[in-house]
Image (cartoon, rainbow, N blue to C red):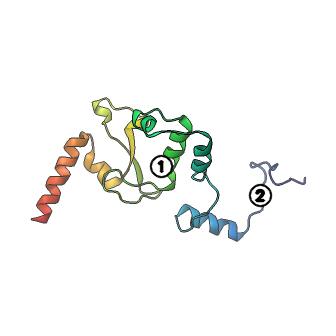
Amino acid sequence: MNWTKNEYDTLTSRPSRDAQFYLQRHRRRHGQCMESGGGRLARFGKIARYKQTSVHEVVAGQLDRVYEAEYNHYVWRVRPQCAYCNELLTRTTLTRDHVIPRAAGGGPGENLVPACAPCNRAKADRSLLEFLVARRARWRACMN
């Protein structure tokens, strides 16, 4: 069978891909190359042209779902940083932390933030305030 570019069956055949494709994919996934002009992040500019928003809507939490979806994609997949120590995360170091612990009634969704494993383990099931106070006390003890 002759398959055209987008009509192949992924279960029985594979598209022809050369070494350049896999090298470019590897670089893109590890943040070693930034492609201009495309991708989901470029959609922010296009969305902003057609869906105007104001500072008041942002502060009031009345953003359109499209903005939220693109922002969440950026936060979790394009440039994830630990919410507690600002360390850049990779796919292998990225963990999800509940800001309000599940033990205290916190659920998924907006309660989840990207975190590195050491911060996630250190926070455990403590509240955010308890974690930040304990971390500051440890930092001060190390400085003295």
Disc assigned to residue 87? none
Estimate the x, y position of residue 109 in percent, counting from the top left: 43, 35
Please state which of the two labelled residues, at mark 2 or mark 1, is closer to the viewer: 1
Judge from the rendering whether residue 8 lies leftward or rightward of residue 122; answer left or right. Answer: right
- Residue 107: x percent and y percent? 38, 32
Query: Dot 1, how many residues are within 10 Å of its Cα: few (below 14), some (14-19), or many (20+)?
Result: some
Q: Is residue 129 above or below residue 122?
A: above
Looking at the picture, tell me which residue is in the foreground, 71 or 58. 58
* Farthest residue, direction right: 1
Residue 87 higher or lower than 74, as above or below:
below
Q: Residue at x 11, y 60 (%)?
A: 141
Circle 1 residue: 76
Q: Amino acid at mark 2?
A: Pro
Residue 108 versus residue 140: which sits nearer the camera? 140
Calculate the distance from the C-alpha at mark 2 to the C-alpha at mark 1. 29 Å
Left or right, 83 with respect to 65, comes to: left
Q: Is residue 63 left or right of residue 96?
A: right
- At 29% from the left and 32% from the top, the residue drawn is 103
Task: Name which residue type carries label 1.
Answer: Trp
* Quadrant holding the C terminus: bottom left
Q: Which residue is mark 2?
A: 15
Q: How far from the left and from the top, in percent, is residue 51? A: 58, 39
As helix, strand or loop, the secondary structure at mark 1 comes to helix
Horizontal side of residue 33 vs 99, given as left or right: right
* Marks 2 and 1, the one that precedes in the sequence: 2
Q: Is residue 90 above or below residue 127?
A: below
Q: Residues within 10 Å of mark 2 (few under 14, many from 20)?
A: few
Tell whether label 1 touches label 2 (CB within 8 Å). no
